[in-house]
Image (spheres, grey):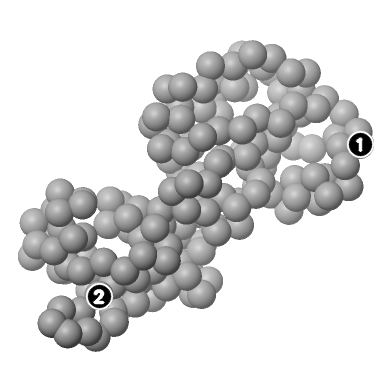
């Protein structure tokens, strides 16, 4: 399901025809059709009856869609090695994912926002950004209390990926 689901996670408002889905995910049409049926059954994708062909669009209002979407990118962040690299080079007390990705409301243009509880350090993120297909923004501050109230609330409502606040 990964590539097919990712297409809808990264393009939440876009409608796709079956042939488009197959072409964009480099999946045979019959395989794509079966996987789309499964995504529709799970409530992740909505099938819209249309002439001459049906269209498929992300079920963005479905809570399960947001949960799967959020977990999909978190898994991708971990498997890219980003969190391990940050932990081994910066030694932070905590790394917290916040913003649109943490809420499951991101699209292909969204940045991945990470709060790093440590002193600022230069980090080359190029290979991770290529692997994730998203820009990565690091917000450094060793003293959580020094952050603005709005940013603190966003981080508190975020997802801890390493350590704790």
Q: Residue at 74% across / 37% down in the picture?
A: 164
Q: Residue furthest right?
A: 145
Residue depicted at 40% across the width and 53% down the height: 10
- At which x and y percent is residue 7? 32, 55
Q: Is residue 67 left or right of residue 21?
A: right
Q: Do labels 2 and 1 touch, CB within 8 Å?
A: no
Q: Residue furthest front?
A: 51
Q: Which residue is mark 1?
A: 145
**Quadrant of the drawing holding the C terminus:** top right
Within 10 Å of disc 2 (Cα), the crowding (few <14, some 14-19, many 20+) is some
- Label 1: few (<14), some or many (≥20) within 10 Å? few
Left or right position of 93 against 122? right
Is residue 119 visible in the rendered image? The answer is yes
Residue 96 found in image quarter: top right
Q: Is residue 145 above or below residue 81?
A: below
Q: Residue at x 71, y 23 (%)?
A: 92
- Tell me how far mark 2 sits from mark 1, CA to CA: 48 Å
State how many labels appear: 2
Please provide percent x and percent y for residue 69: 46, 57
68 sits left or right of 55 in the view = right
Residue behind mark 2: 55
Q: Is residue 84 above or below residue 31?
A: above
Quarter in which the N terminus is drawn? bottom left
| Callout 1 secondary element | helix
Looking at the image, tell me whether mark 2 or mark 1 is earlier in sequence order.
Answer: 2
For residue 81, say whether it is visible: no
Q: Position of residue 70 (x, y in %)?
A: 51, 54
Residue 124: mark in rendering = none
Secondary-structure class at tag 2: strand
């Amino acid at each position: 399901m990964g590539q097919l689901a990712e297409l809808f996670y990264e393009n939440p408002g876009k409608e796709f025809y079956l042939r488009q889905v197959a072409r964009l995910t480099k999946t045979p049409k019959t395989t794509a059709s079966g996987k789309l049926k499964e995504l529709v059954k799970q409530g992740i994708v909505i099938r819209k009856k249309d002439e001459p062909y049906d269209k498929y669009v992300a079920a963005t209002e479905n809570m399960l869609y947001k949960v799967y979407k959020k977990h999909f990118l978190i898994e991708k962040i971990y498997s890219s090695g980003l969190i391990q690299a940050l932990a081994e080079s910066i030694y932070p007390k905590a790394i917290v994912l916040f913003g649109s990705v943490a809420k499951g409301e991101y699209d292909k243009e969204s940045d991945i926002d990470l709060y790093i509880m440590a002193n600022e350090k230069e980090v080359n993120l190029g290979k991770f950004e290529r692997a994730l297909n998203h820009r990565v923004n690091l917000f450094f501050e060793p003293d959580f209390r020094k952050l603005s109230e709005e940013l603190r609330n966003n981080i508190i409502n975020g997802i801890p990926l390493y350590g704790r606040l």
